[in-house]
Amino acid sequence: MNSNYGHPDEIDLKEAEDFGKRMVETSRRIAAGETDLIPPAPDFALTHQLLVLTEFYRYGGNPHGYMKYDSEKCIYPKCSLCMDNCLMNYIDLSASPPVFGSKKTECDMWMGCTFCEMICPTGAISCDWEEFSKKFRSIIPNFGYNPLAKAAEEAIASGRLRMLVPKEEVRPDRPHFKVHEKRPRFRIPKDK
C-alpha cells in the first residue's frame, strides 16, 4: 500500500501538533482574561452531513445500525468497559435483566457512536455492518444527489479535507470503511 494512503501522515501529524500548540496558547490567554478570544456561537446551518443524519433519524434508524447485546458472550463483572464508557449511560449490566441501549435491549442512539461495540473485547456487543451499508445506500437516492460527496467536495475545495484515496476509487460499491473482526477494535489507553 502506498504510504500516502495512510493516516496519520506527516502533514496530519504536523497539523495536529500545530493545532495543539495553538489550543494551549489560546487557553492560557483566555484563562488570563482575554475572553474576547472565545468566538461567538456559529449560526445554524443545514449542512449536507446534517441532512444525512436527519434522514436516518426520520427513517427510524441509527447511522451505524442497531447495536445488539449478547449476554452469552459477555464477561461482566470481569469487564465493565461498555458501562464505564457509554456517553449516554444506556448500559447497566448489573440490572436484572441487563439494560443495554436506549431501548433497554438494543441501542438505537441515532448519533451512532458505537463506542461500546468498538471496545468490547468479546464481541458481546455487535452491529450488523452489512445491513447498515445496505440501509445507507438506500437512503442516499432520497436526496437526488449524494450529500456526503457534496460535503466532501466543499471540504476539499476549502482545504479542510485532503484526499488520501484517488477520487475515482471512492464509489458506493466500495465501502469507505472496513470493520475488522479482531476484538477489541479499539483499546482504551491505560493511565500512566
Image (cartoon, rainbow, N blue to C red):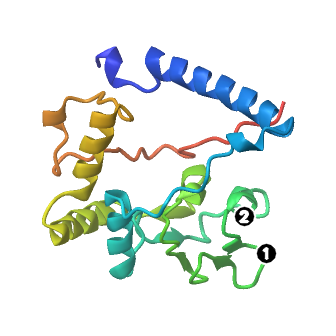
- Choose between 98 and 143: the one closer to the eye: 143
Q: Identify the secondary structure beneath mark 1.
A: loop
Q: What residue does disc 1 label? A: 94
Who is closer to the viewer here, 189 or 28? 28
Q: Viewed as shown, does residue 108 lie left or right of 58?
A: right
Q: Quadrant of the C terminus?
A: top right
In screen coordinates, is 119 left or right of 177?
Answer: right
Q: Are marks 1 and 2 in contact (CB under 8 Å)?
A: yes
Q: What residue type is labelled 1?
A: Ser
Q: Nearer the viewer, residue 164 or 151?
A: 151
Which element type, helix, strand or loop, lies under badge 2? helix
Q: Where is residue 69 in the image (x, y as percent from the top left)?
A: 56, 71
- In the picture shown, does residue 81 fall above or below 181? below
Q: Where is residue 141 in the image (x, y as percent from the top left)?
A: 15, 67
Q: Residues within 10 Å of mark 1 (few under 14, many from 20)?
A: few
Dot 1 or dot 2, earlier in sequence = 2
Q: In this view, does 178 lie to the left or right of 75?
A: left
Which mark's residue is nearer the viewer, 1 or 2? 2
Identify the residue at horizontal 52%, vertical 56% (top origin).
Answer: 42
Q: Residue 83 carries which label?
A: 2
Amino acid at dot 2: Met
Q: Quadrant of residue 79?
A: bottom right
Q: Which quadrant would residue 178 be assigned to in this image?
A: top left
- Image location (x, y in percent) of residue 63: 39, 65
- Dividing the image into 4 quarters, which one contains the N terminus? top left
Q: Which residue is drawn at 33% across and 66% down?
A: 51
